[in-house]
Image (cartoon, rainbow, N blue to C red):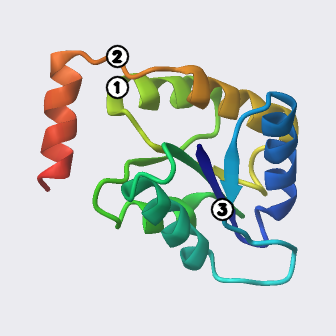
Amino acid sequence: MIALGCDHGGYDLMQEVKNYLDEGKLEYKDFGCYGTESVDYPDYAKKVSQAIVSGECDKGILICGTGIGVSITANRIPGIRAALCTDCYCAEMTRLHNDANVLAMGGRVVGPGLAVKIVETFLNTAFSDEDRHKRRIQKIENC
């Protein structure tokens, strides 16, 4: 199950992501927001992060205007490794090397076509499970 969350700046792009997930019959839970009226991004980043930490969801996708605010907020939650990605290479590498469990994007930065490819890459790339990457992730968790 994928946890979704956005603020008003990410709402339109999140609709594109949801269309992609629906077409692929991928299960998700939408934690909001539900329109373009101004809201506070930390509220949605926290809900998505808590759903992952609790085990309710496996991965998350967060979108705000730039992706910066939601990624900062999500990374404050122990157990979350959120990565702000603006291209497919970053999405692939953060899954392979960091075992990132949250993808952050900027609705005012990434266009819909690229965003869907980034989501696809993030969701379909497995963690490499190499010892060096496990060691580094453990060091992150112990910070």
Q: Nearer the viewer, mark 1 or mark 2?
A: 2
**Nearest-to-viewer mark from 3 and 1:** 3
Numbered disc 3: secondary structure: strand
Residue at mark 1: 97
> Label 3 belongs to which residue?
5
Which percent across, then down, holds residue 47?
Answer: 53, 69
Q: CA distance from mark 1 to mark 2?
A: 6 Å
> Where is mark 2, residue-wise?
128
Question: Disc 2 residue type?
Answer: Ser
Q: Give above or below for 113 relative to 66.
A: above
Residue 126, placed above or below residue 1: above
- Residue at image x 54%, y 62%? 48
Image point (78%, 68%), residue name: 9
**Residue 59's spot in the image, x, y percent?**
51, 43
User: What is the number of callouts on the image?
Assistant: 3
- Give the image quarter of residue 107: bottom right
Q: Nearer the viewer, residue 83 or 79?
A: 79
**Image point 86% across, 52% down: which residue?**
15
Q: Type of residue at label 1?
A: His
| Residue type pointed to by label 3 | Gly
Give the x, y percent position of residue 6: 69, 64
**Element marked by disc 2:** loop
Q: Is residue 140 left or right of residue 25?
A: left
Which sits earlier in the primary sequence, circle 3 or circle 1?
3
